[in-house]
Each structure stands twice: as C-alpha cells, then as structure tokens.
Image (cartoon, rainbow, N blue to C red):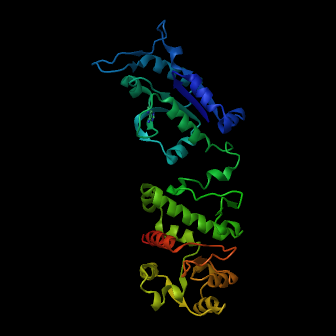
C-alpha cells in the first residue's frame, strides 16, 4: 500500500508513522509513506500557501494552486495509475472499520490534509473523490486524522500484523465488540480468570466469547448492536451461537419448578423456549443419568441441546455427559464448582436470554 499525504507538516506524518508496527511494515516494504510538502508547490517566494477568505470571516483558507500542483506531482509519479483522493475533513463521511477494510484493498491512496479554515473549494471539486472525517469533533488540522486512518488501514494490509488471525475476530468484526481478554496470572488481586477459559474446551470457549461479545456490545454500544441485528442474518447468527440449531433445553426442575415460579426469569425462560420453538424439558432428581435419559429418548444430538443446571452437582453431571451447560445457581451462595467450563450468574441469564430471543426473532 502506498500512501501519498499532501500536507503542510510532512515531518509530523513521518515521525508519527515511522514507529512500532507501522515502522516495521515500512521497513519490510509492506506499506510506503510519501509525505508531500504542499509548500514545495507554491510559486510565492515566502512559500505562502494560504490567503484571506473571499466574503470575509475568521481565519485563512489554503489556496487551490499549491494543492493542485502537489496532487499533479503525485499523479505523474504514479504513471497513470488511478487513485482515490481522500480529503480528511470533519465534514466527511465518518471513518469506520468497514471503510478501513474497503480502503485497505486499494494499492495507492492520496490523502489531503487541510489546515486553517479549510481549502479553496475549487481544488476540492477538481481532485477529491472521498470526504472522510474521523469523528464529530474538530482538530487543528488533518494530519492526526490521516494518521488514524493510515494506522487502521495498514493493520489490514496482509503481513502487517505478525499474527494474521488477530485482525480476524476483533472489535467491530460483524459490528460486535471484542470479548474480554485475560492473561497471566490466573488470580490477580483476588480476581480470577473466568473458568471456561481454563477448560481447554474450544467449542465452549468460542460460545462463551461470542456471547460475551453480544452482551458487551449491547451494554456499551447499543447503536452498534442494533446495526448488528439489522445486518446479520439473525437466524444464522443464532445458529452460530449454538453451532447447531438449538432443539432442546433441559432445565433442572429446581430452576423452573412450581416452587420457584415466583422468580420473574422463570417465566421469561419459558417464553424464550416457546418463541424459539425449542423444547423445554425439566429434569428432576439427582440421578447422574437424568439428562442423558431425556435427550436419548427424544433422539436429540448433544450439540442440539443446552442444559441449564441449578446446582454444582447438576453441572458436573451434565459435564460428565459432555453436554453444553449453563450454570444458574439456584442458591446464590453456592460456590461455582472448580474447573467449571461454562458459568453464568442469573443476572447474566436475563441478558443472555434477551440476546438469544432477539437473535432468533428474524
Ligand atoms: N480535520 C479537522 N478535524 C477533523 C476530523 N474530525 N476528521 C478529519 N479531519 C479533520
């Protein structure tokens, strides 16, 4: 990727971009920065590039001719190749991950950085193909905005990130924020890592992460979440969550049995199952085979089934049967079993149910 940046502050671009990951990408020749000093293209002996605005008003306007000549010089060096010309301006389309992905597919990009009160409209009409802003606030000039865009675009250029997969599932992928991450130590200031991440069970880890992404996006960025729901094929997203379409939920009786119907979520839970067309079966007793017997009798595959356990014992029984299990301790004081692969609190269940319901509504 070749970036040609038309700017009054080429050294700012050079210094800002020649470090860390982008610096290494430039050394490897994966990206190239051509910072063009617009002042080199003025005919004024004081290298002046701005003048007062016609009609009056505060500030100065960048003149058309130096900008045009800088652009012509870049074009002539590109040997007839076409290139998008992006004017970075708060008046543009707001830059986002999908625009970064689109621009990362280009071979050459020309970015024009304005200063003062703007650039003479006539040269913009002549050369600009895209007007792009990095957000609804006003910077002193376009350089920082151009650097933000170059950074976001460059990390999508193959080879720039050493770990190619890290750009694959990350924040904004499919309009979802990234799931929470943890590293060593396992216990930090008495805070533990969610046990599912220590389980080594990749299917369950993937399910947990996906659900965390939903919950986080819904809580922190409801605007993005709505976009996600609108744009995704909702049913297929629901299937992705459970890998295989969910056909049955087995809930331990003590979660939903008559003695507990006063709990609001029990009703929600029943509604959810009904809406999804998922069969809801209550399992009673403490026989370790109780889940097994139910799904075998129904001819349901393990991956089509979710167990909602109400006790640590229930979780362990379901795990012994290799069933995907969500734990909702009926007794809030109950400790989570050690090495539990999938764990959620009741408060999270309500969120999770709402997510699943909306996913399957489409
Ligand atoms: N120039 C000044 N403010 C800007 C913004 N928010 N985005 C892009 N370019 C700018």
Residue 83 seen in this snapshot: no
Frontmost residue, 105 versus 347: 347
Residue at (49%, 82%) from the top-left corner? 278
Residue 79 % position (x, y): 59, 26
Is 307 rendered above or below residue 176?
below
Question: Taking 110 as reference, is 276 above or below it?
Answer: below
| Residue 57: quarter of image | top left
Q: Position of residue 311 (x, y in %)?
A: 60, 83
Left or right, residue 126 beside residue 240:
left
Question: Can residue 196 be seen?
Answer: yes
Give the residue at x 65% y 31%: 18
Q: How many marks?
A: 0
Residue sitting at the far left: 55
Q: Nearer the viewer, residue 87 or 312?
A: 312
Residue 105 on image: x %, y %: 57, 42
**Residue 312 found in image quarter:** bottom right
Question: Residue shown at 57%/42% (left/top)?
Answer: 152
Ligand 1's quadrant: top left
């Amino acid at each position: 990727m070749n970036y040609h940046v038309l700017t009054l502050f080429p050294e700012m671009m050079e210094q800002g971009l020649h470090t860390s990951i982008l610096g290494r990408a430039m050394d490897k020749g994966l990206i190239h920065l051509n910072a063009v000093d617009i002042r080199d293209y003025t005919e004024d002996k004081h290298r002046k590039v701005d003048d007062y605005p016609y009609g009056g008003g505060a500030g100065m306007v960048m003149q058309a001719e130096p900008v045009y000549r800088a652009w012509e010089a870049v074009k002539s060096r590109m040997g007839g190749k076409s290139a998008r010309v992006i004017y970075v301006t708060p008046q543009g389309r707001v830059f986002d991950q999908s625009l970064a992905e689109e621009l990362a597919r280009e071979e050459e990009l020309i970015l024009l950085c304005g200063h003062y009160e703007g650039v003479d409209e006539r040269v913009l009409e002549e050369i600009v193909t895209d007007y792009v802003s990095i957000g609804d606030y006003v910077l002193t000039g376009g350089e920082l905005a151009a650097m933000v865009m170059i950074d976001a675009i460059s990390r999508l250029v193959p080879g720039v990130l050493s770990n190619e997969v890290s750009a694959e599932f990350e924040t904004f992928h499919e309009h979802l924020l990234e799931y929470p991450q943890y590293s060593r130590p396992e216990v930090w200031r008495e805070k533990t890592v969610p046990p599912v991440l220590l389980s080594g069970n990749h299917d369950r880890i993937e399910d947990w992460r996906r659900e965390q992404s939903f919950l986080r996006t819904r809580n922190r960025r409801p605007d993005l979440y709505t976009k996600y729901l609108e744009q995704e094929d909702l049913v297929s997203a629901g299937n992705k969550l459970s890998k295989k379409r969910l056909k049955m939920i087995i809930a331990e009786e003590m979660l939903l049995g008559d003695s507990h119907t006063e709990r609001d979520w029990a009703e929600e839970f029943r509604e959810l199952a009904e809406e999804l067309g998922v069969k809801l079966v209550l399992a009673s007793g403490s026989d370790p085979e109780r889940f097994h017997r139910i799904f075998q009798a129904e001819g349901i595959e393990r991956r089509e089934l979710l167990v909602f356990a109400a006790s640590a014992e229930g979780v362990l029984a379901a795990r012994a049967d290799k069933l995907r299990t969500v734990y909702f301790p009926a007794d809030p004081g109950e400790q989570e079993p050690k090495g539990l692969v999938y764990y959620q609190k009741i408060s999270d269940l309500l969120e999770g149910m709402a997510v699943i319901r909306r996913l399957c509504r489409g």
